[in-house]
Amino acid sequence: MIDNIFTVANTAVAGAISIILLSLKLRVKRLKCDPIEAQNNIDENIMTAIDFLCTGLDADRIVIQEFHNGEKYFSGNSQQKLSISYEICKKGVSSIFRKFQNVRVSALSNIIKQSMTDQVLVQLDNEKCSYSYDLQTHGTTSAAFTILKTLTNKNIGILSIHYVNRNKPKLTEKDKDLISRQSRIISGYLVSHKITT
């Protein structure tokens, strides 16, 4: 009889300890996967990547815009849009972050078409899309654009490098290589957030 009581008590204690350990393990796991902390780490990495790019290209402003769906037209078609998710500016250069949210992709159709396969440097006074006019009102005279893609070649955004109140005559091979490397790094960080949350 004492053996039975001991077995029941031992089983109950072991079960209680197991439940406590499991709940602690789940709580620690939740603390480790705090989505705000995870997003902040990704944001810091992306900002570091675009800051490095800004310095390497002697740019005045760098912007990352991500594609997303907007509302629907009466026809039922989705409005394809993009919004600035990251920006870095040199001291004295105005921010455009809040001014370019929910921009219809059609406003950049020519720029997107040109930059689908490679980086493209655009002298904005020669470009006739509405987005280029808007950028010019904020002092941008030249801008390099490249599409951000996943490893499976899905378009996720646009990286644009702005030169304010000065022209960038061309992109050198060194510039193109730097843009290409940093674009892959940035794309990886953008996609990693979707995987971890």
Image (cartoon, grey):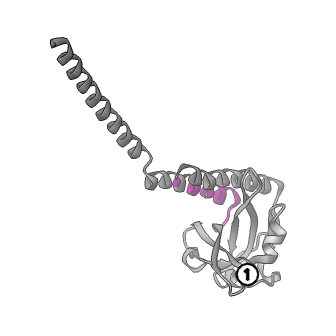
User: Quick one: quadrant of the N terminus?
Assistant: top left
Question: Quadrant of the rendered structure where residue 88 is?
Answer: bottom right
What percent of the width, then of the height, locates residue 109?
Answer: 79, 77
Which amino acid type is marked by label 1?
A: Ala
Question: Quadrant of the rendered structure where residue 65 is?
Answer: bottom right
**Horizontal side, residue 132 vs residue 37: left or right:** right
Extreme-left residue of the structure: 2
- The structure residue drawn at horizontal position 75% and vertical position 80%, both measured from the top left corner, is 106
What percent of the width, then of the height, locates residue 52?
Answer: 63, 54
- The structure residue drawn at horizontal position 26% and vertical position 31%, both measured from the top left corner, is 16
Residue 4 among magenta residues: no
Under circle 1, the secondary element is helix
What percent of the width, then of the height, locates residue 7?
Answer: 23, 17
Q: Nearer the viewer, residue 58 or 26?
A: 26
- The structure residue drawn at horizontal position 27% and vertical position 29%, both measured from the top left corner, is 17
Question: Quadrant of the rendered structure where residue 140 is?
Answer: bottom right
Extreme-bottom residue of the structure: 74
Image vertical order of residue 47 relative to residue 169, above or below: above
**Horizontal side, residue 70 vs residue 155: left or right:** left
Asked if residue 89 can be seen in this view, the reply is: no
Asked if residue 172 can be seen in this view, the reply is: yes
Name the residue carrying label 1.
Answer: 107
Q: Nearer the viewer, residue 163 or 186?
A: 186
> Which stretch is magenta?
44-60
What percent of the width, then of the height, locates residue 87?
Answer: 58, 66
Assign the magenta stretch its main secondary structure.
helix
